[in-house]
């Protein structure tokens, strides 16, 4: 097997922009984390054409062969099971069949079990965040939109009240 190589950050940034910040397979937003994926499965081929950014669910789906357990799906099943258990515990506490102290201990155990599952199934391993350059550009863009909207509203407000506040001066300026 070829030696694993990693994509350069500039390639990740370009692909992130090209994918418009969404998973290449399912279209889920990547703002909470993503994985770099070699499309052709060759970990030594680091051409930009071979890079796609995937959400963890889609990336884990590329692992193994048919019939093997998908670590992401296994963890999600455990999360669902734990949520059902929490619902049952809350029901018993509301009915007065379980004390608050017992509920706290059970919830701590559930939290520990989910944390261990994330570790064993390597759920957060190699999970990346939005490249800093993109996060900064996005913030600047949002700021620019807010400034433009504010100025547009200010201009509209001035236009709406200028005849009311100083109609004489407005007529003099127009001449």
Image (spheres, grey):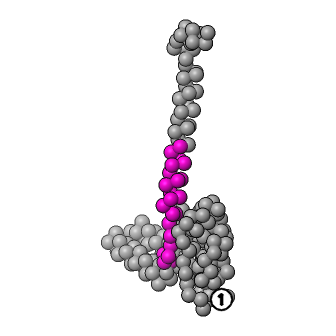
- Is residue 76 rendered magenta in the image? no
Please say if 170 is above or below 25.
Answer: above
- Is residue 127 rendered magenta in the image? yes
Q: Is residue 93 left or right of residue 59?
A: left
- SS state under label 1: loop
Please say if 104 is above or below 156.
Answer: below
**Rendering coords of residue 95 (x, y %):** 42, 68
Q: Which quarter shows the C terminus?
A: top right
Tell me where the magenta segment starts and ends, as one range.
123-144
**Rendering coords of residue 56 (x, y %):** 56, 73
Farthest residue to the left: give it.
Answer: 101
Residue at 67% from the left image edge and 80% from the top image edge: 40
The residue carrying mark 1 is 65
Looking at the image, how many numbered discs can be counted on the residues?
1
Residue at 56% from the left image edge and 87% from the top image edge: 3
Please say if 169 is above or below 152.
Answer: above
């Amino acid at each position: 097997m070829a030696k694993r190589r990693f994509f350069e950050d500039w390639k990740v940034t370009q692909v992130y922009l090209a994918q418009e910040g969404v998973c290449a397979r399912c279209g889920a937003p990547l703002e909470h984390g993503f994985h770099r994926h070699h499309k052709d499965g060759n970990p030594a081929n680091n051409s930009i054409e071979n890079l796609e950014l995937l959400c963890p669910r889609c990336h884990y789906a590329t692992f193994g062969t048919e019939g093997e357990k998908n670590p992401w799906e296994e963890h999600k099943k455990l999360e669902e099971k734990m949520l059902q258990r929490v619902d049952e515990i809350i029901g018993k506490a509301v009915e007065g069949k379980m004390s608050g102290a017992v509920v706290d201990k059970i919830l701590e155990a559930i939290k520990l079990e989910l944390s261990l599952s994330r570790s064993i199934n390597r759920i957060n391993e190699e999970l990346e965040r939005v490249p800093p350059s993109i996060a900064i550009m996005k913030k600047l863009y949002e700021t620019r939109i807010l400034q433009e909207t504010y100025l547009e509203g200010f201009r509209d407000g001035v236009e709406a009240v200028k005849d009311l506040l100083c109609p004489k001066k407005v007529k003099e300026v127009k001449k």
